[in-house]
Image (tube, rainbow, N blue to C red):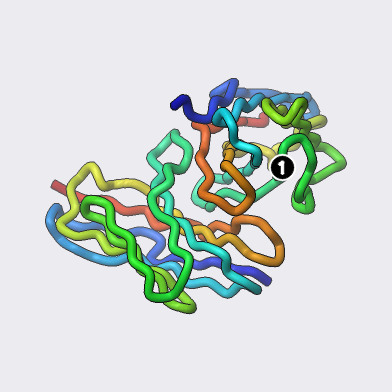
């Protein structure tokens, strides 16, 4: 069964304290891995797409990396406005659909 | 560029009633998706369309849920009759082609009493 697991479920950091979120996957065939940010009461907002192991993408304080079995979302010197739920999703080649993890709820305290 | 539009934003109904949600995707996007998101979980795919044809509806509870995408643009998702466990946020998304990054609307929060 195609599965995407994110850890931790929740993470609380102080402003400026860097950390990483993990997304591990077991799928029949990966065509792309996507990271989204979701604020309360809103739909997910697209952040990055990664296609192959070793690939990295950056946007402001966020950097996403990909290996053959997992992806990391590194957040450097976070600010309170980075507080949100971060969702990881994998496009499964055979099933031709996007499978989401359960998300990591990130809180940055000032 | 306008994003994905959804309406209504909120809906409260009694169990066994029916409800319909509407979605207008980003202009030019061929693929449209409906997801169900239960509180504390990631979105779960219900159905996806390529233009006005169904690509995958394997996780759509077809005894009560139906969806259509007329003329390959707007889409409606209907639930009839609703159950308590249908309480969730219903998200619509679109992408240029199947497999590309998806862009989401704000969602419709459904409460079934």
Residue B108 visible in the shown view: no
Q: Who's the residue at 26% across and 57% down the image?
A: A12
Q: Is residue A66 above or below residue B60?
A: below
Labels in figure, total: 1
Q: Name the spot of residue A40 as percent of width and height, x first.
A: 40, 38
Left or right: A90 as drawn, with respect to B60: left
Q: Who's the residue at 77% across and 26% down the image?
A: B70
Q: Is residue B87 above or below residue A56?
A: above
Q: In what element is the residue under mark 1?
A: strand
Q: Quadrant of residue A92?
A: bottom right
Q: How many neighbours does mark 1 have within 10 angstroms: few (below 14), some (14-19), or many (20 or more)? A: many
Classify the position of the N terminus of chain A by image quarter.
Answer: bottom right
Chain of the residue under the numbered disc 1 shown in the image: B
Most distant residue in the top direction: B8
Left or right: A5 as drawn, with respect to A13: right
Residue underneath mark 1:
B50
Q: Name the spot of residue B2 as percent of width and height, x first.
A: 47, 25
Instruction: Using the image as rendered, state which of residue B87 and residue A95 is in the foreground.
Output: A95
Q: Who's the residue at 44% across and 35% down the image?
A: A42
Q: Is residue B80 above or below residue A31?
A: above
Residue A93 visible in the shown view: yes
């Amino acid at each position: 069964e195609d599965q995407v697991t994110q850890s931790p479920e929740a993470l609380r950091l102080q402003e400026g304290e860097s950390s990483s979120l993990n997304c591990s996957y077991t799928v029949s065939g990966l065509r792309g891995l996507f990271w989204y940010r979701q604020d309360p009461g809103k739909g997910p907002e697209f952040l990055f797409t990664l296609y192959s192991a070793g690939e990295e993408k950056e946007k402001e304080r966020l950097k996403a990396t990909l290996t053959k079995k997992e992806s990391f979302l590194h957040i450097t010197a976070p600010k309170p406005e980075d507080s949100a739920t971060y969702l990881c999703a994998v496009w499964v080649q055979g099933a031709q659909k996007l499978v989401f993890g359960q998300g990591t709820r990130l809180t940055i305290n000032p | 560029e306008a994003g994905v539009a959804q309406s209504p934003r909120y809906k409260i109904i009694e169990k066994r009633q029916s409800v319909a949600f509407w979605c207008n995707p980003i202009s030019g996007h061929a693929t449209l998706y409906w997801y169900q998101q239960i509180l504390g979980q990631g979105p779960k795919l219900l159905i996806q369309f390529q233009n006005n044809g169904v690509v995958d509806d394997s996780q759509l509870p077809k005894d009560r849920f139906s969806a259509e995408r007329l003329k390959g643009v707007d889409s409606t998702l209907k639930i009839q009759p609703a159950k308590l466990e249908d309480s969730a946020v219903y998200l619509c998304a679109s992408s240029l082609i199947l497999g590309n990054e998806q862009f989401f609307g704000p969602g419709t929060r459904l409460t079934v009493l």
